[in-house]
Image: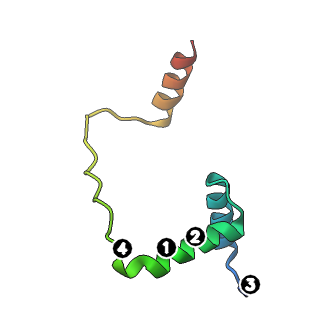
Amino acid sequence: MPGLLIKDFPPELHARLKLEAARNHRSMTRQALMLLEQALRGSGAKPGPTPPEPIDLGVSHDSEWVYRAAREGRE
């Protein structure tokens, strides 16, 4: 089977690939192959639906609010 060597692989891209591979329970090689297959197949692929705009509920969720909600949820 042919191999592929990528030189000067940017460290931040390497880290993102590693993270995505772990999230998908794949090796980095399998993740990279899956992404390449998707990209090369992409000319006929249809874009997904556009997500709706966020709804403003008038509530500020700052870090203190998040910590307090987490603490209350554990009680």
Q: Position of residue 52 (x, y in %)?
A: 25, 51
Pointer 1: residues within 10 angstroms few (<14), some, or many (20+)? few
Q: Which residue is mark 2?
A: 34
Tag 4 and tag 1, C-beta contact below 8 Å? yes
* 3D distance between C-alphas at marks 2 and 3: 16 Å
Amino acid on which the number 1 mark rests in the picture: Gln
Q: Earlier in the sequence, mark 2 or mark 3?
A: 3
Q: Which residue is mark 1?
A: 38
- Specify the farthest residue to the front: 1
* 3D distance between C-alphas at marks 1 and 2: 6 Å
Residue at 49 percent of width and 31 percent of height? 66
* 3D distance between C-alphas at marks 4 and 1: 9 Å
Amino acid on which the number 3 mark rests in the picture: Met
| Quarter of the rendering occupied by the N terminus | bottom right
Q: Position of residue 12 (x, y in %)?
A: 65, 70
Secondary structure under badge 2?
A: helix
* 3D distance between C-alphas at marks 4 and 2: 15 Å
Residue at 56 percent of width and 20 percent of height? 71
* Left/right of residue 31 with respect to residue 45 in the rendered view: right
Residue at 45 percent of width and 78 percent of height? 41
State how many labels appear.
4
